[in-house]
Amino acid sequence: MNIESLLLTAKKVFRYSPARRRRASRFISEKVSLKYLAFTLLLASASVHSEPISIRDAARASAGIAVWEALNDQDIQAAHFSYEFSPMEDFYSARPTLMMIYAEGGNIHISAGLTKEMAINENFSWGFGSQIGFMDDDRVLGHKIEFYSRIYGSYHISNITSASIEFGHISNSRLGRYNPGSESLVFSISRTIHR
């Protein structure tokens, strides 16, 4: 190990301020409740499902975990929750989508938009989506209005359940004085909801 790598490691260890460490420890204690919330959402979605409807054709609820600032080595953790309505046959089979992101430090982003999914084969599909939403704290990303775009791949575990991995980007599209933007990696589980 050379001197440069030791200095880089020391810089990473000591770059966190005491306030950031307190926020991180608070988030860790909140993560337990977020896990229970995600589990409850999936359990509730299973209980309202009354007939076997394909995950590709029905409305669905998703819960996921994410790492934000993924490309900037910041590793901010978040929980993603979404509800996708059934595809609109008369509008390219796009799905109206509602989403809430709860990020480390208590930051919340609530958005609405469209998602389009295409089948690769019987078990796999891919898709993309774009949403506009509101951030509760405009100091985080430079403006209260934020745009979220994503591309994802899904594996259909069963007729009513799928697992997805997505890459997303959020920014204010230069509406604010500064536009730091952020990228995310998200793993989520989706279950169908009765039509």
Image (cartoon, grey):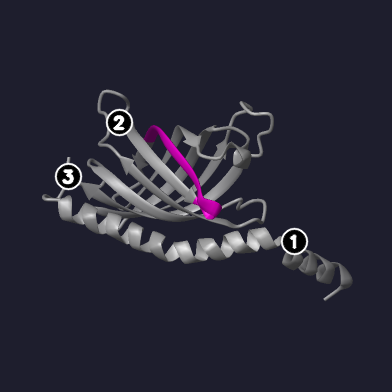
The amino acid type of the residue labelled 1 equals: Arg
Q: Which residue is mark 2?
A: 93
* In-image side of 101 versus 58 (left or right): right
Q: Residues within 10 Å of mark 3 (few under 14, many from 20)?
A: some
Q: Main secondary structure of the magenta part?
A: strand
Q: Earlier in the sequence, mark 1 or mark 3?
A: 1
Q: Earlier in the sequence, mark 2 or mark 3?
A: 2
Residue 58 percent across, percent down from the top left: 22, 42
Front residue of 187/112: it is 112
Instruction: State which mark lies toward you, 2 or 1.
Output: 1
Query: Disc 2 on helix, strand or loop?
Result: loop
* In-image side of 141 versus 149 (left or right): right
Position of residue 71 relative to residue 5, above or below, is above
Seen at 16% across and 50% down, the residue is 48
Instruction: State which mark lies toward you, 2 or 3.
Output: 3
The amino acid type of the residue labelled 3 equals: His
Q: Which residue is mark 1?
A: 15
Q: In the image, which residues are magenta?
A: 103-115
